[in-house]
Amino acid sequence: MDIQTLRLFVAAAERLNISAAGRSLGLAPAMASARLAKLEHELGAELLHRTTRKVSLSQEGAAFLPYAREILAQSEAGRAALGLNAKKPSGTLRFAAPSSFAQLHIMPLLPAFHAAYPDITLDLRLSDTRVDLIEGSFDLALRSAPLTDSSLKGRKLGDDRRVFCAAPAYLEQRGTPRTPADLDGHDLLSWGTAAPRQFAAGAERFTLDPRRMICRTILNDGTAQRIATLAGGGISVNSLWSVAADIRAGRLVHLLPDWRLDDASVLWLIYPQSNVLTPKVRVFMDFLLAQLTPAPWGAAATGSG
């Protein structure tokens, strides 16, 4: 099993086109097909289903794909350690990130990254629903949480402070809460669940109980929550990185500024423990850290309106 054939298999699995995968590696279609057939014979499994009209990944191929990517990553890292990779980092980097964060803070940076690293293709999978980093064969992911999974490594990108906010029009109509007790009876735009959540201000604690508010909307998308808050739908708890620009512009008011969600969440760039940190992953991590630390949203919310 040679590295070039593994690279061909990964390319074919990503493109679902054997001829195109072969061309990307300088192989004629017949040679590409022959190499893949030899690999399947060695493994004793059909990795790709082929018909006259299309190519699809088999169940065995899907199971083998993350291991093939890992072997290629290890090979690339080994060559880099020996100084054998003189060219710029290249290849496809699979990156998972919350859609809301990516839209605001990563998408605007892509032109600069591609200008610096034109040989890297970013395969971005954006969703506010958390993905499994290992099962999804991702090289890197952005995650907001305490890093407790021992199978992962990571570098801190920044704090993920969660704050209360509401639109000025909503507050004019319903009043501005000055203490946690004043939240009772207000409309709540809830994130993910209507379960109670604990907040802290120094050593003080209070539990936000949605049953004491009017909670008719539960969302699992940060951008949708922000838009609903801007529209006057109620009070919400948002990541500061999501609402900082709106607070600065006066479109939202930061409420109860001394209080924050007490969950120790941090923005991490994480990758599997088993992965060698390949050049393409390293340069993307370094790029994001250089652009986003210190956090541009860090000092946005200073008052309660």
Image: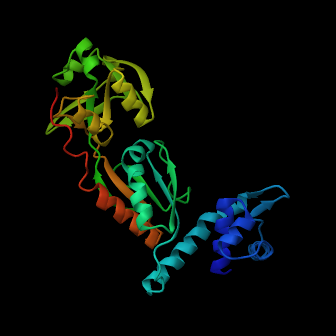
In the displayed structure, does residue 158 sit left or right of residue 75?
A: left
The image shows a total of numbered marks equal to 0
In depth, the one of 254 and 61 nearer the eye is 254
Which quarter of the rendering shows the C terminus? top left
Residue 46: which quarter of the image? bottom right
In the displayed structure, does residue 73 sit left or right of residue 288?
A: right
Q: Which residue is drawn at 63% across and 79% down?
A: 3
In the displayed structure, does residue 251 sit left or right of residue 51?
A: left
Visible residue check, residue 285: yes
Residue 106, percent across and down?
39, 51
Visible residue check, residue 151: no
Residue 148, percent across and down?
37, 55
Q: Which residue is drawn at 14% across and 39% down?
A: 202
Above-or-below relation of 68 to 147? below
Residue 100, percent across and down?
41, 41
User: Outermost residue, top direction?
Assistant: 173
Residue 190: which quarter of the image? top left
Q: Residue at x 17, y 33 (%)?
A: 257
Above-or-below relation of 184 to 31? above
Residue 302, percent across and down?
15, 36
User: Outermost residue, right direction?
Assistant: 52
Which quarter of the rendering shows the N terminus? bottom right
In depth, the one of 86 and 41 nearer the eye is 86
